[in-house]
Each structure stands twice: as C-alpha cells, then as structure tokens.
Image (tube, rainbow, N blue to C red):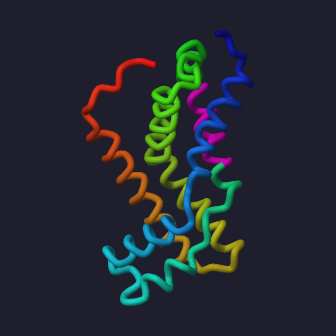
Amino acid sequence: MSMNKKQIRTHIFSTIMAKVEEQDETKRQEALNEFMAVTGTAGNASEQVASLIPPIMHDLYEKWITMFIDRLMETVPLKNIELLCDGCDGNNGALVLAYIMFLESARMEKQIDEDLRQHGMRGGANDELGDLAANYIRAQMTKIARQTNNDDEPKGHC
C-alpha cells in the first residue's frame, strides 16, 4: 500500500475527527457536572453551570487536528506514518493517542487556552468561562492519557 501525503493527511484527519464526533451530549453534560462538583468550581450550581458551557466549535477541533498532522509530518518519516494509516483499530488508536499526547504538550496547552479564550469572547462569554472550559479539557485529556497508559494488556499487531 502506497499513500501520498494528501491521502495520509485525509486518513489521519478523518480518523481523529471520527473519534471527536463520537461525543454524546448527555455524557458531556454529566462529565462537566462531575468535574465542577469535584473541583468545587461552580459551588452548588454545577448542573446549571455545566448546561451553560457550549460544545467546542468544530473549527477548533479542525485547527488542532491540522496542527497535529502538520507537526507529525514534520517530525516523523512519511513511510512510518503510512504504516499507521492502514485503517486497523490498533493503528487508528495509536493515531488518536499520539494526537492526545500532542494536545498535552506545553505549546498546545498554551494554544488551546488562547483558542478557548478567543472562542469564549466570540460567543459573548467571559474569561472565567473560557478558563473553566480549558481546565475541563485539560483534565479530560489527562484522564484519557492515564487510562491509556494503565492498559498493560498486550494488543498484538493488526
């Protein structure tokens, strides 16, 4: 199987975006409510505050995924990336994990904070709401990374 750069970019983008779009609104609201209840962010009104936080705009995900693909293609030989683009579940999972690790980098944490603040300002929200959204996303990424790192069960090859 030989893929050109455009095919590789398209595969990686669609794989990660499919994972992003799996989000369920009810689960998102529950997770926000739980996060705010545990951190005491919203006092006794965590459910109400959770309902006020809108889903992150699709264009932010597109921006971050594109930044990930750009960085991946700058730093990893194309033939190695192509191996991850065979469509099997294990390799798709590896792409998603690499994306999550990219989002956890110091550079991307700053970028995400900046993007969420700008997004919040465009939506008429204040800085506190943008900070809350940024903290929530950071906590969720850490949780996913821990779950992935604690999974010691060998998966084999596709």
Q: Residue at (67%, 10%) from the top-left corner?
A: 2
Residue 45: image location, x then y, percent: 43, 88
Which span of residues is magenta-colored? 62-74
The one nearer the camera, 157 or 118, is 157
Magenta region includes residue 69: yes
Magenta region includes residue 81: no
Q: Residue at (50%, 66%) from the top-left corner?
A: 28
Point out the residue furthest to the bottom here.
44
Residue 17: image location, x then y, percent: 63, 44
Q: Residue at (44%, 44%) from the top-left corner?
A: 105
The one nearer the camera, 26 or 141, is 26
12 to the left or right of 139:
right
Which quadrant would the N terminus be assigned to in this image?
top right
Residue 16: image location, x then y, percent: 59, 40
The one nearer the camera, 47 or 100, is 47
Q: Residue at (69%, 79%) from the top-left corner?
A: 124
The one nearer the camera, 78 or 108, is 78
Residue 70: image location, x then y, percent: 63, 33
The answer to which quarter of the image holds residue 67 is top right
Q: Is residue 30 above or below residue 78?
A: below
The answer to which quarter of the image holds residue 135 is bottom left
Magenta segment, prevailing SS (helix, strand or loop): helix
